[in-house]
Image (tube, rainbow, N blue to C red):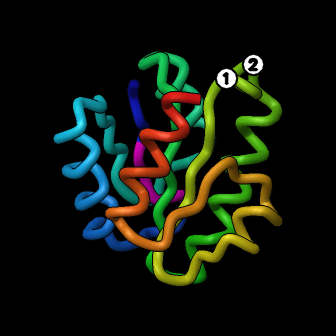
Amino acid sequence: GTVILGTARTKGSASARNLVGMMLGTEGIVIVDLGADVAPEKFIETAKGKKANIIGLSALLTTTMPGMKDVVQALKESDLNGKVKIMIGGAPVTQVYADEIGADGYSPDAASATDKAKELVAS
């Protein structure tokens, strides 16, 4: 499978995102890390171009969380709706927030993010 990683819209830390990317890479999953401050459209375009299974969004600060909702909305409005899953995580993020914005998966840390991504790629 292929996972597109990034921090939505507002600048955030790359450390957790990098760790998830490294762990997924050892599982044979292709990682495309777009970095920080990524526009929703960029996630969608890249997921389309790379035929991705998952878009993974990371937030270190609460200020980056609204951008996650924007990416979920952009995906729902695209022709990738139902084909690509969105997974979110990071210190301020919760399962409640994931449910609220319509994300397909949530993970509190890098180790469980790897398991969740493998589960979503398989489904």
Mark 1 crowd level (few <14, some 14–19, many ≥20, 10 Å Cα)? few
Secondary structure, mark 1, is: loop
The magenta-colored residue range is: 5-9
Check residue 25 for magenta coloring: no
Left or right, 20 with respect to 63, comes to left
> Which residue carries the number 2 mark?
79
Q: Which residue is drawn at 75% across and 27% down?
A: 81
Tag shown at residue 47: none
Quadrant location of the C terminus in the rendered image: top right
Task: Where is residue 49? Give x, y as percent.
Answer: 47, 16
The reply to whether the C-beta atoms of the residues labelled 1 and 2 are less than 8 Å apart is yes
Label 2 residue SS: loop
**Residue 6 among those drawn in magenta:** yes
Other residues around mark 2 within 10 Å, as few (<14) / some (14–19) / many (≥20): few
What's the CA distance linking mark 1 and mark 2? Answer: 8 Å
Q: Nearer the viewer, mark 1 or mark 2?
A: 1
* Residue placed most toward the observer, 52 or 78: 52
Residue at 34% x, 52% y: name it.
35
Amino acid type of the residue that numbered disc 2 sits on in the rendered structure = Asp
Question: Would you place residue 13 above or below residue 53 in this image?
Answer: below
Q: What residue type is labelled 1?
A: Lys
Where on the picture, by quarter, is residue 48? top right
By secondary structure, the bulk of the magenta-drawn segment is best described as: loop
Q: Position of residue 32 (x, y in %)?
A: 32, 36
| Residue that mark 1 sits on | 83
Q: Is residue 36 above or below residue 26?
A: below
Where is residue 27 drawn, in percent x and y?
A: 24, 38
Spot occupied by residue 8 in the image (x, y as percentages of width and height): 53, 58
Taking 92 as reference, is 2 left or right?
left
